[in-house]
Image (cartoon, helix red, strand yellow):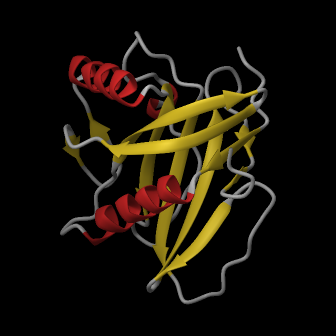
Amino acid sequence: MLNISNVVLSTEAATIIIKAASDGYLARYKEERLGILFGRLYGSTVSVSLVKVFQGGIKTRTAVDVNSRSFESRISHLSSRHRSRFLGTFHTHPEVANSISSALSNEDKVPICEKYMPLIEVVATIWASDSPVRQSQYYYQVKYGDYRIRIAAHRFGGSFTIVPVSTKGFK
């Protein structure tokens, strides 16, 4: 297992994740969103340059149920087309019943397909708030309209340790 120390999102990658979180939150019944992360590994730094929201699957407030073959096919196609390495996935956690979480559930810790093992899992949590954004050592946080979004990254496998995520120092 690789020793990943941090995750750096390109501005475009962060923007797509933030928009996906907002779209899921604003859906009629709030829905999680799922996406695929591509880019490069520089030593222990994961640099995410490309994010594709996965359009398939059944979305609920707390999950996205995906056909693993369809997901695998999408990864293969996009990786080849963009000449980028599959790094992992992201999914969103919309606020539900005044509760938010950036933690991974047991389901989040299972790879969607076996052919492509993720290095990271990124969680974008969104909730209604007019409070000021406070950056932290580990989370990338933004104000987006009347909402706050917290992006967390977890090293996939083993202990699923949280690692710092930022948009600074992108390679």
Residue 132 image offset from top left, x and y in percent:
66, 86
Seen in the picture, residue 134 relative to 72 is either above or below; the reply is below
Seen in the picture, residue 28 relative to 4 is either above or below; the reply is below
- Residue found at x 60% / y 30%: 40
- Residue found at x 59% / y 26%: 119
- Residue found at x 40% / y 10%: 115
Side (left or right) of 3 relative to 165 = right
Residue 126 image offset from top left, x and y in percent:
47, 67
> Which quadrant is the C terminus positioned in?
top right
Seen in the picture, residue 16 relative to 51 is either above or below; the reply is below
In the rendered picture of this protein, how many numbered marks are placed on residues?
0
Quadrant hosting residue 166: bottom right
Front residue of 106 and 116: 116
Residue 157 image offset from top left, x and y in percent:
63, 21
Seen in the picture, residue 128 relative to 65 is either above or below; the reply is below
- Residue found at x 66% / y 79%: 133
> Which quadrant is the N terminus positioned in?
top right
Front residue of 83 and 104: 83
Side (left or right) of 116 relative to 137 = left
Residue 14 image offset from top left, x and y in percent:
52, 57
Front residue of 49 and 6: 49
In the image, farthest residue toward the top: 115
Quadrant hosting residue 22: bottom left
Quadrant hosting residue 41: top right
